[in-house]
Image (tube, grey):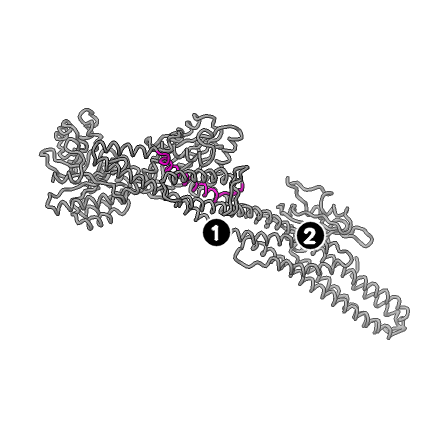
Amino acid sequence: MKQSPSITVFMLVWLLIVTAVLSVFALMGLGYNLVTDLNAQRDKVHQELINKRATVERLQTMLAEIRSESLKLFYDQEQENHHDETVHQYTRVLLPFIARFDVEDNTNLERCQRALEDLNRFTDRAEEWASRYHDVRRRYLEGGGLMRIRRLLRQLHSIADMVQGRQRLEEAVLVQHWRENSSTSAEAVARHIIEERQKRWYPLLREIRSEVDSLGQQVEQLASARRTDQLVDIRDNMLKPGLERLKRNLVILIEDHVLDDSAALDRLEQLKVELFGKQYQIDPAYQTVVVTGGLYELHRDHIVLLRQRMVLDKSLQESYVGLESLNVALAQLTQSRLDDLGSQAERWLHETLDSIKQGAYVVLGLFVVIGAVISWLVRRQVRQMFLLQRDKELILNAAGDGIVGVDRTGRASFVNPAAARMLGYDAEDFLRRYVVETIPVVLANGEHVMEQDHPISQTRQLEQGLCVRSDLDAFRRRDGTIISVEYVATPLIGSAGQHEGAVLIFKDLTRQQQAEERLEEKKQLLDHMSNHDSLTGLPNRRLFQDRLYHAIERARRSSSEMSVLFIDLDRFKKINDSLGHELGDKLLISVARRMQSHLRRSDTLARLGGDEFVVILEESSHSHFAAVIARNLLNELSEAFDVESHRLFVTASIGISRYPYDAEDVVGLMSSADAAMYHAKSRGRNNFQFYAPEMNGRAQDFLEMETQLRDALALEQFEVYYQPQYDMRDQTLVGAEALLRWNHPERGMVPPGDFIALAEETGAIVPIGEWVLMQVCRQNRQWMDEGLTPVRVAVNISIAQFRSNLSQTLEQVLEQSGMPAELLELEITESMLMEDEEETITLLNELKEKGLHISIDDFGTGYSSLSYLRKLPVDKLKIDRSFIAHVVHNQSDAAITGSIIALGQNMDLRILAEGVEHEEQRDFLLQHRCYIAQGFLYARPMTAEDFVRLL
């Protein structure tokens, strides 16, 4: 068994004592010098260990600060950044620290200097980028350029509206003159109106409004673009021609004196400046816009800077890899330095002992007591050397990286706790094992590398100063699990050049990889959320426009065709109003799933918002294919949807546009499909229509109709008509039904069937219904004040009114008008009664307590049960006109009508028949004891002035 150094020194000292009897004083002096030198050597090594430990800890702290400051440089705009100062401070500490190791060889020092120079260059580039990015972002967020552009577009739109409104007013005045003057003057007025409309500026007004709307959409596309090629396309192919067309049309209006001044051209010029800068111009060679500033230049700089940040972020990661390499180098240098200190101490001890041996011949006469004292001093110094060795091991054990020492046979001679913990071993159990077998390196396919390819085996072929390095590899632990590691294997070369073993230093990267994977998952989730509808999970408008753009490019390259289907659910707002938005959202999810299941994987189904969906059909060679898809979707949507406890039915209107026949860009295809969809709605809904050029005018008419309907109430264009209700037995007036008419300035008197459905769909039915209630009550109160016979007037209530604080509205109407509640009758439909039975019964009871009369309109067309009907506090049943129309010649209608009359009599309810136009119908009703009726047989709907003559 090999003896420890302390025992060897002890025996040598006693041998010297026996032989050193010749000179006591010389031995005492030699011993004193020995003790002094050993103390100095111990203090030197101990102090150096303390200094290096403090320096390493400081460098680790500063490296963490560099990481933190780098992240703030990119992502924290508010806090002050000290990245450059921290890097310089790190350099001032690191370079002197490494220089103390590389006294003879400056390899490591030069390597560190290169890494720090790369980091400083990255710092300069990153700070320059941050300054530009923050400046562009501040101008982008605070400049308000987009808001000014939107305001200018609204002003141009208003100018066109004012010109059109003035023209319509002039025509209305001329029409009034036409009505009042003689036939000769009327012909002159008519010719004048026709000549005005044939002038070249007249159709330009609608074109200007359309062009301004198109520019608004193009500006929004410019603001949401994510690539510079998209910006160029929008600038040269959308904005430039649109601005030129708008300027041309405005100049024509000014030349024809339709516009009094050049304010519109000034607004147009301001719009160009806001878009392209004050010094913009048109390149005559390529007919493209040369931009000098504005929203376009600012948004392009923003996109370029975002791409530069990706490049800088990659450089940042490479710099961090370089800093990690410096940490590994520091660990190697520290280990090497500690080994050198131990070797120096050992050599110094051997040299001192040699000196003692040489002087032994002189000191053979020394006394035994002096020898014992020297022996005690030597043992104490050797013990202190062992303490220094223990401190060295404590430093290695405290290291966070795994460190394994390997002897020349390939067995583990040292393992720190970090390495044992990472590999799943106890430190004692790990020692003396073959490292190649104990730490297998795992390939991507799960197999182990060959023994000759193991990093420890490879170190046997290396020379001094070289190492085996891997930034990412895998070790298999004792329990069979795999960890991702970064390692460095360095050979240990003896003084004679022989291989004494190796040192393996590795770091567990498993948690770091997991954190990076989680970060990547979060990025993917955010990207998905920004491009998909949060309710249905379908692509949203942004992703849809991108896919449509690429689909158009693919079709253009392959000279193929494609189609766009614009889908709008019919009367979906009624479901939201009656059943609530939560159930409406669930219905939208079911609709999206059903449509998605009947499309190809190559097709794109997106939700634009609300109840609007759109489909991209690529590689559709002819219109028949798009028609088949549209028809299949309509058939699938017509099937019932079971949502919670409700069985719901929906239909859709589909507009189809085709590339390249209808349009060749995103905006054109969408506009054409939208116009075709509006045409489908005008054809009765629940159908599909292909785009045709004349549909643009129809879609515009539909939109104008919707806008005019919203303004009709404020412009007092509505009028209430009254249709009398008679007792057929004695022709006595017993009541009236209020009917709404729209006195349109251009279309004339519009019946309810042409606009009530649109009012319900847009939500305008609620304020219109409240206006009708107020008008009827005020008119009836006026008749009472004039001493006329009181008459009960029936008013139809829509489902939107029924669900919108109807009770409170009626209280206000009755209070403000002063009309008695018993003179107001509310007509509700069977379908309204079937929604939320308990709430409906509660509301009707509340209305009855106020004194109001309630009747069920169009009775017999719904599905209300007899048991439910008995619970309702109703006063009257109105037989639908569809049964009365054929009651004489259709046995089925006659049977249903007779059953309704018998049901009402059994429930002690009044019965009224609608649409009585012939005497045969009257006779049938009298025969079955139905005595109250309304219809053309007795009176048509009339104005209040005509109706008052009947009172």
Report the front residue among 727 and 740: 740
Image quarter where the C terminus lies is top left
Magenta stretch, main secondary structure, is helix
Query: Could you tell me how far apart the alpha carbons at marks 2 and 1 are, in whole angstroms?
Result: 50 Å
Q: Hey, what amino acid is under mark 1?
A: Leu
Whole-percent x and y of residue 883?
21, 30
Where 423 falls versus 257 (above or below)? Answer: below
Badge 1 element: helix
Residue matched to label 1: 141
Q: Write down the region rendered in magenta.
A: 199-228
User: Residue beneath label 2, please?
Assistant: 505
Q: Residue furthest bottom?
A: 25
Marker count (numbered): 2
- 140 or 252, which lies in front? 252
Q: Position of residue 512 (x, y in %)?
A: 59, 50
Is there any visible trace of residue 428 in the rendered image? no
Q: Specify the farthest residue to the top.
A: 889
